[in-house]
């Protein structure tokens, strides 16, 4: 399994101006990773930092210099937008585009429109050789994502398996991963805990230190999906409330299993809430914590990958 990293893993570095897309690619090379996934949401194409042809060419050349793969992250299913994103993917050499349907509007309408929109994009995907992965974001259950993919019915549109987002929809991550894995074209591999402040929150932590059974999620993706790559997304510094009422979710209950709150107080080295402003004098320390969280997460995932190589699996079967 080839291993990559999503740019959100360094979102604090990007927002503080300490890192750009080129520094990010170099950092991934230093970490011994095989590829990158670049989030292009937001102002000026997000972490890509612009879409002028020269910049896109430089990104592609740097990725090729390091012999890496590249994927792209966007959102929404509007065909005009997706067409532009597929052209951007072509320019930087990305062969996978992640997107999601839930963009803050009427969720039922967004989910209902998605199959038609994505079906319109399938011929362009085929022409360019680029797959679209529809993500279980923070509102959708795996069943809703599978319904979209089945209605599109194209080899060019599959699932983007996010091993943590299902928690915001009250769905167990292992169950969601198992359901989505057979149709996967991309992934976000992450870890979360639940804490209770004024309300229950899902909080990103270093991969391998949270409540998700990461080893089982990795096994499912390695053995039951067509994926040859795994994208780690480290969510230190991010937290979110549950995306839908518990009774309308995927069956999880607060206090049970992965939804059992982790009691505080929480060290800032492990938990940093999105709502907590970081004073300028603390930013250097916070950035160092995020980098450490990335390093430890990458090493953890590399360890999982070593235990799931074909040779390791064959040896385990013989034993």
Image (tube, rainbow, N blue to C red):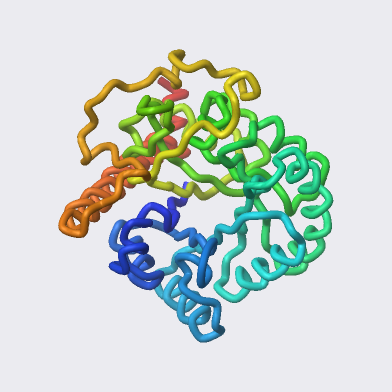
Evaluate whether residue 236 shows in this view. no
Residue at (20%, 53%) from the top-left corner?
Answer: 288
Name the one closer to the observer, 17 or 297. Answer: 17
- Give above or below for 286 relative to 196: below
Query: Is 289 situated left or right of 70 in this image?
Result: left
The percent position of residue 136, horizontal first and vertical second, equals: 61, 40
- Residue that extends furthest to the bottom in the rendered view of this protein: 54
- Residue that extends furthest to the top in the rendered view of this protein: 256
- Give above or below for 46 relative to 237: below
Residue at (32%, 69%) from the top-left corner?
Answer: 17
Query: For residue 26, what is the image quadrant?
Result: bottom left
Number of numbered discs visible in the structure rendering? 0
The percent position of residue 27, horizontal first and vertical second, equals: 31, 63
Query: For residue 93, what is the image quadrant?
Result: bottom right
The percent position of residue 180, horizontal first and vertical second, equals: 63, 35
Query: For residue 187, what is the image quadrant?
Result: top right
Query: Is 192 situated left or right of 167 in this image?
Result: left
Residue at (46%, 81%) from the top-left corner?
Answer: 58
Evaluate whether residue 39 shows in this view. yes
Residue at (64%, 36%) from the top-left corner?
Answer: 140
Q: Quadrant of the C terminus?
A: top left
């Amino acid at each position: 399994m080839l291993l990559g990293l999503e740019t959100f893993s360094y979102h604090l570095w990007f927002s503080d101006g300490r890192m750009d897309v080129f520094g990010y690619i170099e950092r991934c090379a230093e970490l011994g990773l095989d590829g990158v996934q670049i989030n292009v949401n937001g102002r000026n194409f997000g972490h890509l930092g612009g879409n002028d042809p020269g910049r896109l060419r430089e990104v592609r050349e740097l990725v090729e210099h390091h012999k890496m793969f590249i994927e792209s992250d966007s959102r929404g299913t509007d065909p005009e937008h997706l067409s532009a994103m597929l052209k951007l993917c072509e320019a930087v050499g990305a062969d996978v585009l992640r997107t999601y349907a839930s963009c803050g509007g009427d969720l039922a309408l967004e989910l209902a429109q998605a199959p038609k929109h994505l079906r319109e994009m399938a011929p362009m995907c085929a022409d360019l050789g680029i797959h679209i992965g529809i993500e279980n974001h923070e509102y959708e259950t795996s069943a809703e994502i599978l319904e979209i993919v089945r209605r599109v019915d194209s080899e060019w549109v599959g699932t983007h398996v996010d091993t943590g987002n299902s928690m915001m929809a009250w769905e167990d991550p292992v169950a969601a991963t198992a359901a989505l894995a057979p149709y996967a074209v991309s992934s976000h591999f992450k870890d979360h805990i639940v804490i209770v402040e004024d309300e229950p929150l899902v909080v990103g932590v270093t991969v391998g230190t949270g409540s998700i059974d990461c080893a089982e999620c990795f096994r499912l993706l390695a053995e039951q999906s067509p994926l040859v790559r795994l994208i780690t997304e480290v969510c230190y510094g991010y937290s979110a409330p549950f995306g839908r009422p518990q009774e309308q979710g995927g069956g999880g209950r607060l206090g049970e299993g992965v939804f059992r709150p982790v009691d505080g107080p929480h060290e800032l080295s492990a938990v940093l809430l999105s709502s907590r402003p970081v004073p300028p004098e603390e930013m250097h320390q916070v950035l160092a914590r995020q980098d450490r969280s990335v390093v430890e997460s990458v090493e953890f995932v590399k360890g999982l990958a070593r235990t799931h190589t074909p040779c390791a699996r064959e040896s385990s079967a013989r034993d």
